[in-house]
Amino acid sequence: DTAVSQTPKYLVTQMGNDKSIKCEQNLGHDTMYWYKQDSKKFLKIMFSYNNKELIINETVPNRFSPKSPDKAHLNLHINSLELGDSAVYFCASSPRGGVERREQFFGPGTRLTVL
Amino acid sequence: GQQLNQSPQSMFIQEGEDVSMNCTSSSIFNTWLWYKQDPGEGPVLLIALYKAGELTSNGRLTAQFGITRKDSFLNISASIPSDVGIYFCAGHYFVAGAGSYQLTFGKGTKLSVIP
């Protein structure tokens, strides 16, 4: 009955590789997000998707591309991985509607290590 | 983007003591959320605040939305060992260019409880 799930939990890869992280939510939410948490635990939003449309894109390198096959999934593709991409990546989702309904629920995270 | 100043950065307390942490900003926020993150896990929502001046409790946790909408505090009473973790404040603000709300996070308060 996991609400927001991510795979894999850990990802270790070589610099220059291309990798993907998957996210699924079974909460029926309309909006999904990707966050990056650095070594200092700072959480920074990368993307958000609402009904398959990108609605916020922070200054993230275009090597990162979110892809949403349907409302319940938002995958993160990363091309040409760099050392600085090492971090924990969190997926989150929230219901659409008024601001009162925008609590975000987070997945367990994917720890990416680039060697 | 909007910035949240969260303090203290870390706390060491004795079991049974009360804890207080807060977030301030020079900007106005529509909602305030408080999350807790355990090691190796994603942030878990503790309390959501929607209206200026609102005071909300969740068990031993109490949080308030500042009357100016620029600050919030979280109190934990009678701390126990399982309260250990990182606590984040987060605030929603409207991004006119995107036509949607974005959530920004404080840098976290790391709580250690000494049995």
Image: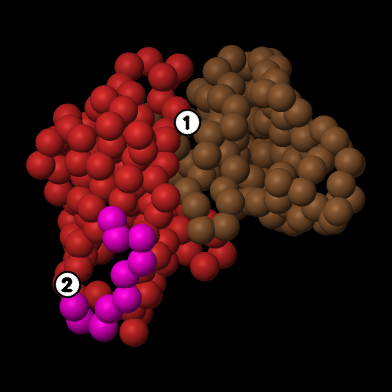
Chain colours: A red, B brown
Q: Is residue B60 visible?
A: yes
Segment colored magenta: A7-17
Above or below — where is A78 with respect to A115?
above
Above or below — where is A3 with respect to B49?
below
Residue B26 position within the rendered picture, expressed as x and y whole percent measured from the top left: 62, 37
Q: Residue at x 71, y 50 (%)?
A: B84
Image check: A44 left or right of B15?
left
Say which chain tag 1 marks. Answer: B
Disc 2: CA contacts within 10 A as few (<14), some (14-19) or many (>=20)? some
Residue highlighted by disc 1: B92
Quadrant placement of the N terminus of chain A: top left
- Determine the secondary structure under disc 2: loop
Report whether mark 1 lies on the same chain as mark 2.
no
The answer to whether residue A11 is magenta is yes
Image check: B102 left or right of B18?
left
The answer to whether residue B39 is magenta is no
Under mark 2, the amino acid is Asp
Say which chain tag 2 marks. Answer: A
Above or below — where is A38 with respect to B18?
below
| Picture disc at residue A18 | 2
| Picture disc at residue B21 | none
Q: Residue at x 64, y 45 (%)?
A: B87
